[in-house]
Amino acid sequence: MKIIKNNLYIIKLCYKADPLWIIMQVLSTVLGYVLNTFISIYFLKYIIEAIEGNRSYGEALFLIFGMFFCNVVVNLMDSYTLDILEPKGLVKVTALLMEMLYGQAISVDLSCYENPEFYDTYTKANEQVTGYASTIIRTITRVMGILVSLVVAVFSIVVCEPFVIVIVVLPVLVEQFLVKKYTEYKFNRDRDTAYDRRKVEYVNRTVYLSEFAKDIRLSNIFSPIMRSLEHAMKQMRKTSKEYGVKIAIVRFFRTIMAELFVYLGVQILIVYQYLVHSAYSLGNLSMLLNAASEFSDLIGGFSWARNDIYECGMFIENFRTFMDYKTKMPENENGKIPNRESVDICFKNVGFTYEGSKTPVLKNLNLTIPKGQKIAIVGHNGAGKSTFVKLLMRLYDTTEGSIEVDGIDIKEYRLSAYREIFGTIFQDFKVFAASVTDNILLHGNATERDKERVKEALQNSGIYKKICELKNGIDSQLTKEFDKEGALLSGGEFQKLAVARVFAKDCEICILDEPSSALDPLSEYEIFENMLKACEGKTIIFISHRLSSTVMADKIYMLEKGEIVGSGSHAELMKQNGKYAEMYHMQAKRYQEEQAYEA
Ligand code: ADP
């Protein structure tokens, strides 16, 4: 039942994408089948009857021309459907499925990306569903054609020799069981190779994507990657071989059932009835033999089609499982809309542990950030600074305690509206293959006013002059992915561009999560200084492990192993002479040594 439902689900989608294609496909396939069945059962019978003098020459000629004409019409419909409508329809269906698939992929929880099972389902849904759309449409229409043709064949047999049906039914039932087994083996083979196919896909990506190109050329990292590819291939060969033997055995018995029992049995019966009992005329003998052979072919075709339907149904299940995935962090359509005038943040006993891990990354965090305050969160790598930001932005939910904005638990807000109050740059920000403007606004509908904002943001982040030197200024394409004249900037320049995103966004809370790791301390200091000027009145959360930049903050929180080990202004923390002061002195000393060395 589920299998049928899954197939209908995809057919509905295809019909929604291109109704003309589906209607024509049904018409041309069903007509094609019926015509073929009719010709193979009745053509010879009528010709024999004409030879025997039971039909006129005119009748025979009418039959011959009639069939020729019908064949021409069906072939024309077939060509129009398969060569013109189907390719167009498939592009539309693929676009629709991709839109659904990608829409779901970008809305699932971030934690899904750390879950290999999720990745497997996604990979399977992604690589199979579009390929199966055409198979399903062809198969379902084939089944319709087969069923109508079966009615014609059964009718032709039953009028002359009803016993033939009995000979056919038993092997057909056994065959249905074999079909089920056959499909199950194929599905399991696919399931068992999914993990290795994902490995192959990963290797493919590392070779293809530019972000890996330098490391691969300058290091030996490709050899372990290749080893993992070889291992995956070996596993896939082993799995394919295991299932290959089972599939071959089942396939052999299926053929025997159809060929030996059905075809042979029916022929023996009909020939016996004709020769021993003179049960029918020569014309009817030809009709019966052809109808029996057609019947057996149609049943065989039906089993294979059923097989395809079953197979498609199982694969569509992957797509539906993925599409049915309910995010743990839903949009909350009826949630509250944040009051932008009052965005005081309060962490209450917040703790957090990543899924699948036992060690908490954040423990018992209590802090308040009033609107407009400039705070810095500092600490060594791995202290939990980025996790702090992810919780605040609701990319993850706290596992203990709660976060409030304006005195309201952040889970009560409408998710998209809540995230809109933030302008954030992450450590691992990405530059998209799009124009400078789109890369800063992060949407594709820039108005003239937006462009002015982009220019101002670029000035504040200190990269405007460089962008003006590009051929098309702020409309220049970034990266050479789709445009060979696309601009490539240095790591530091890309970082300044990313910072400009925050400057350009109409947000209340600006977060910079170590966006300056590729910048020298002076540039980082400059960015922070510019930010203080450009984001007057807004809350700023600056995350860094470099303390020289954070001295300007109103309040600094020092994190260590997920806990706050010091808080206050720079002066206060230095006076406390705790971990912060220790880290500050250490960094200052190293900086002075570097300066001396360079001098
Ligand atoms: P910081 O930003 O201070 O360098 P993070 O917040 O990125 O630190 O990470 C804190 C700890 O959480 C680290 O030990 C890191 O390995 C771990 N961690 C970060 N992200 C994940 C994740 N997605 N799953 C499991 N552990 C994670």
Image (spheres, rainbow, N blue to C red):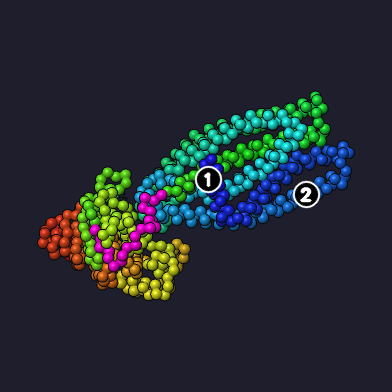
Task: Classify residue 81 as left or right of residue 239.
Answer: right
Three-letter amino acid code at disc 2?
Answer: Phe
Q: Residue at x 71, y 51 (%)?
A: 75
Q: CA distance from mark 2 to mark 1?
A: 39 Å
Task: Classify residue 53 as left or right of residue 256.
Answer: right
Q: Residue at x 42, y 48 (%)?
A: 325
Q: Position of residue 215 (x, y in %)?
A: 36, 55
Q: Residue at x 80, y 24 (%)?
A: 276
Q: Can you tell which mark lies on residue 464?
A: none
Say which element carries label 1: helix
For the question of whether residue 355 can be seen, the reply is yes
Residue that extends furthest to the top in the rendered view of this protein: 276
Quadrant of the rendered structure where residue 91 is?
bottom right
Q: Which residue is mark 2?
A: 68
Sort mark 1 into few (<14), some (14-19) or many (20+) by Cα contacts within 10 Å. many
Bounds of the magenta segment = 326-346
For the question of whether residue 207 can be seen, the reply is no
Q: Position of residue 45 (x, y in %)?
A: 80, 38
Task: Classify residue 264 as left or right of residue 588.
Answer: right
Q: Position of residue 432 (x, y in %)?
A: 41, 62
Say which element carries label 2: helix
Please name which of the two marks, 2 or 1, marks the residue nearer to the observer: 1
| 327 is within the stretch colored magenta | yes
Q: Is residue 557 above or below residue 34?
A: below
Q: Which residue is mark 1?
A: 6
Pick whichever, 497 or 45, lies toward us: 45
Check mark 1 vs ligand 1: CB closer than 8 Å? yes or no.
no
| 42 is within the stretch colored magenta | no
